[in-house]
Amino acid sequence: MKIDILTLFPDMYIGPFSESIIKRAREKGIVEINIHNFRDYTKDPHGNVDDTPFGGGSGMVLMCQPIFDCINSLKKDNSKVIMMTPSGRVYNQKIAYDLSREKHLIILCGHYEGFDERIRSICDMEISIGDYVLTGGELPSMILTDSIIRLLPGAIDEESAKFESFNNNLLDYPVYTKPRVYNGMEVPEILLSGNHAKIDEYRYQEQIRKTKELRPDLLGDKYEDKV
């Protein structure tokens, strides 16, 4: 997969994309990530990429020209252009899975008061990571990139990905390690039984229980008769 990110603050990506799973995936050639400062594409003699809004109002609005030119220089037939914006579709694991099947993602990060509305015409999808306001689209784009890369074949252990939170709209089951007893708290006996069929059923029931307790909004009629 290839991911191109458009931003005004490329240095923000140095740390997050140089560690852990993302770093290893890049080194293995599983993903190619390129960071583009779309200020480099402006034709404004002063290097501006934003201007005051027509009709008045506070803040500055990102202009069409540098963003259109940057995206058009990168876009291919198999590209999907994503705008990070508070008004977009709220991100979840299903969207992450869908995007992990794409060949080329172009992710546009906003800043200041927002985008010129016409920029939406060059985007295929708008995504929000939640109902709150951030300074810009850089942090959301990092979250998007991380969640997608870990789903790519070879990025992490396949078995780990299979049983992660939000698969089948369920949270992950509780996990334990040594010692068996800590501060009077014991590991559930079933996990020490060696009976993998019973362990799998226990973990499934724990997923449902935990989701009902912490995130009941994720559950549908499918799990009403469980636990």
Image (cartoon, grey):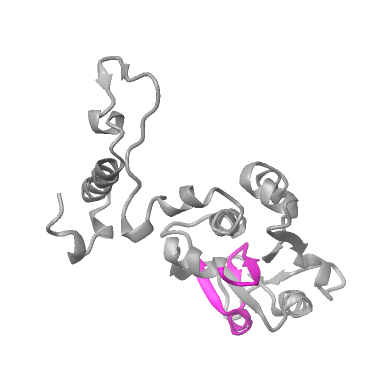
Q: Which sits in the foreground, 100 or 5?
A: 100
Q: Is residue 60 visible?
A: no
* Residue 184, quarter of the rendered image: top left
Instruction: Name which residue lies at 59% across and 58% down.
Output: 153
Taking the image as shown, residue 55 lies to the left or right of residue 224, namely right
Q: Is residue 112 magenta?
A: yes
Q: List x then y, in percent, for residue 188.
A: 25, 29
Instruction: Using the image, determine if residue 39 lies above or below residue 145.
Output: below
* Residue 81, quarter of the rendered image: bottom right
Q: Which residues are magenta?
A: 101-127
Instruction: Name which residue lies at 74% across and 60% down.
Output: 35
Which quadrant does the N terminus fall into?
Answer: bottom right
Taking the image as shown, residue 44 lies to the left or right of residue 203, namely right
* Residue 142, quarter of the rendered image: bottom right
Give the residue furthest to the top: 183
Q: Is residue 177 visible?
A: yes
Instruction: Name which residue lies at 60% across and 65% down.
Output: 59
Q: Is residue 146 magenta?
A: no
Q: List x then y, in percent, for residue 6.
A: 70, 65
Taking the image as shown, residue 137 lies to the left or right of residue 96, namely right
Q: Which sits in the foreground, 109 or 179?
A: 179
